[in-house]
Amino acid sequence: MPLNWSSEIPRDPRGQAFPLRRTPANGKLVAAITCENLIGCDTHFYGGHTIPCERPDCGPCQDGMPFRWHGYVSAIEANTRLHFIFEFTAQAADTFDQYYKAHGTLRGCRFEAYRLHHRPNGRVILHCKPLDQQEVQLPKPPNIPNCMAIIWNLPAEQIDTRQKRNGRPAMTNTHQTLGRFNTPKNLPTKTKGN
Ligand SMILES: [Zn+2]
């Protein structure tokens, strides 16, 4: 019986899957941000995983579980060229927020992330500086809510394909979880000539 050999590579209909990474307990992560700004939402640590909070209709909330904001950016690792989604806490987000205010974008921000005293739950320390974009070509950023929908295994029909086409991380309101993605309230809106 013939095998189903083909040079067609199977594609996830939801879009390209990006790995999710956090600040390592040991060593440091060195990467450059590819998206314009961070985006985040409330999450629960539930059943051994981080999952999005879906309040007002949220099982973990009804079980009295606390929720916690997590921020996300897309970034490319310096030495492996791996394009990934970086997850960070609200406290670490302040460093990115200050960079955004100073430079008007996070794209091209080279950062080093490590944990204080190299403890697994140690405070995340971020050092940021602009990358020389003449020297390093950054890839187009993915749509972060779509990437997180794949990571969180939300059904494909809840992903806004219009957002996927323009390739920018943006708010999407097609799903109540994704619709809650937001930037922190104190972030300025980007204006021309600023
Ligand atoms: Zn919840």
Image (cartoon, rainbow, N blue to C red):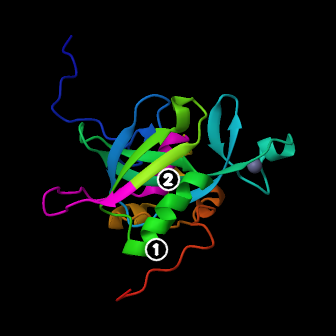
User: Residue 100, located in which quarter of the rendered image?
Assistant: bottom left
The residue drawn where x is 34% and y is 89% is 193
Report the quarter where the C terminus lies. Answer: bottom left
Foreground: 157 or 68? 68
> Residue reaching furthest top?
1
The residue drawn where x is 17% and y is 57% is 137
The residue drawn where x is 18% and y is 23% is 5
The vertical placement of 176 against 24, above or below, is: below
| Label disc, if present, on residue 101 of the rendered structure | 1
The vertical placement of 106 against 43, above or below, is: below
**Cα gap from disc 1 to disc 2, whole angstroms:** 17 Å
- Indicate whether residue 139 is drawn in magenta: yes
Q: Which residues are magenta?
A: 128-152
Report the quarter where the N terminus lies. Answer: top left
Picture coordinates of residue 149, whole percent (x, y): 52, 48
Residue on which the image places disc 2: 72
Q: Is residue 149 visible?
A: no
Q: Secondary structure at mark 1?
A: helix
Marks 1/2 in contact by CB < 8 Å: the verdict is: no
| Label disc, if present, on residue 82 of the rendered structure | none
Amino acid residing under circle 2: Tyr
Q: Characterize the local packing of mark 1: few (<14), some (14-19) or many (20 or more) Cα atoms within 10 angstroms.
A: some
